[in-house]
Amino acid sequence: MQSILNIPFEHRLRFVTGVFEPGCGALREFLSESRDESPARAILFFDDGLIGANPHLPQSARRYFDLLDRDVELVDTALVAGGERCKNDPAVLRDILQRIHDAGIDRKSYVIAAGGGAVLDAVGYAAAIAHRGVRLIRLPSTTLAQDDSGVGVKNGVNAFGKKNFLGAFAVPWAVINDLHLLRTLSDRDWVSGFSEAVKVALIRDATFFSRLCRDAPAIRRREERVAFDAIQRSAELHYRHIVHGGDPFETDQARPLDFGHWAAHKLESLSDYRLCHGEAVAIGVAIDTVYAQLVDMVDADLCRAVLDCLSVLGFELSHPLLDEAVTLMEGLEEFREHLGGQLTITLPRGVGRSVDVHRIDDALMRQAIGYVGQVEMSGRGVPEDGVIGKG
Ligand SMILES: NC(=O)c1ccc[n+]([C@@H]2O[C@H](COP(=O)([O-])OP(=O)(O)OC[C@H]3O[C@@H](n4cnc5c(N)ncnc54)[C@H](O)[C@@H]3O)[C@@H](O)[C@H]2O)c1
Ligand SMILES: [Zn+2]
């Protein structure tokens, strides 16, 4: 016997400001969907970095639940160590599972995770394996988690020295991007997520790319209206790819939204994770864009605009690790191994479009890495009108 299993998932994404304000309906809307005779239960995990900067949040959350006209009980709130620590330490995963167990979370209950990509990954993995999967509501609290990772359907923790070795594909019950949560990010974590916006704009949306080039200085200055627009558009493009791209669980060889990521993953590990994901992605996008120029897929103006945009956003593109091009290029083989099958790398073709290639010219890639390693930004930023690709 052989059949196709067609299992529909609903993927819900909202943008709000002040998720625990009594007037904010998003959380209430998603919690209400499980209503039956017995009250639903919920447990809320917070990133400890988020709470360090916003100590009032657990109290606001409890008040929100107290005022709910829904049969949902907030049984427990807990802190999870923010950043990669929570994905590296198996004891953290165990503690999260223990709290889920002790709170009596069943398959009609909710695990809510508020935090950066790392905490969402760790709590998300626990939610995916407890009872073989309970409802997970994500409240991403970093730019990267809001404009990319939190919208996705993956989770994971690190094991046996390998990043995300344990993990699952699991569609979250809902994702609520509360833009106000981003206000307390460090400058470094603020900037970090915008490389994913540049990445997706360059291969999917020419207008958005031009807007990012124009708005890069304002985003760096943390002008909220401009930055929130960029985060929202990036999240929408990632969401659209997952929902309509035809391959949410990544069974195909092609992984377009991993443009720039073969080098990024390698740079993260070579730097012992001193480079964070968004910073490494900025360098990876720069390298693959320069390579795309060398193989005539993008013109010099567009290539310059990408590098300028990343640099104006606040990313450092040259890095000592780029002096070791041969070591870095081992990342290509590791990327292929991770996907299985033949190497498939997505490159930009002009602006707003991409192409998958299966062969990389070693000499040209070394040249691209060398170029980014020595790149001296013009300092002039991007053209006034933000128009790229002319000439
Ligand atoms: N699942 C996926 O599809 C996917 C995709 C990309 C990246 N990731 C993972 O995401 C992680 C990186 O996520 P990240 O860039 O969000 O960083 P992060 O989760 O490491 O958080 C960065 C720091 O910010 C703190 N923080 C979080 N929110 C805050 C706030 N609002 N105010 C103040 N501090 C706050 C955290 O405590 C942490 O110290 C990596 O583990 C990466 O592997 C997952
Ligand atoms: Zn990424």
Image: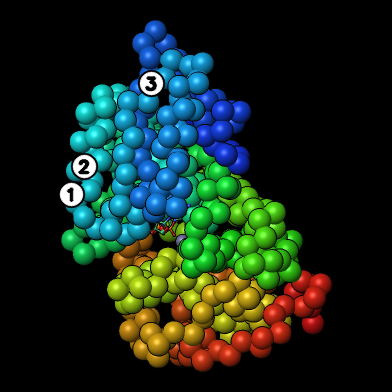
Residue 381's image quarter? bottom right
* Nearest the eye: 94 or 131: 94
Residue identified by numbered label 1: 91
Q: Which quarter of the rendering shows the N terminus?
A: top left
Is 52 rendered above or below residue 256? Answer: above
Which circle marks residue 263 in the picture?
none
Q: Nearer the viewer, residue 67 or 239?
A: 67
Label 1 beta carbon within 8 A of ligand 1: no
> How far across and down, in percent of the image, does residue 363 sit?
45, 90
- Residue at the (54%, 25%) spot, across then down: 29
Residue 30 seen anywhere in this rendered image of the structure: no
The amino acid on which the numbered mark 2 sits, given as a three-letter code, is Asp
Give, as a three-letter code, the residue at label 1: Ala
Q: Position of residue 161 (x, y in %)?
A: 21, 64
- Ranked by sequence position, the earlier of labels 3 and 1 is 3
Q: SS at mark 1?
A: helix
Give the secondary structure at mark 2. Answer: helix
Q: Quadrant of ligand 1?
A: bottom left
Q: Which residue in the protein does label 3 denote?
A: 73
Q: Is residue 85 visible?
A: yes
Q: Disc 3 on helix, strand or loop?
A: strand
- Residue plotted at (45% across, 25% down): 65
Residue depicted at 32% across the width and 77% down the height: 270
In-image side of 123 versus 316 (left or right): left
Identify the residue shown where x is 70% and y is 58%. 226
What residue does disc 2 label?
95
Marks 1 and 2 close (CB-CB < 8 Å): yes
Q: Is residue 366 left or right of residue 96?
A: right
Q: Earlier in the sequence, mark 2 or mark 3?
A: 3
Left or right: 12, with 280 as reference point: right
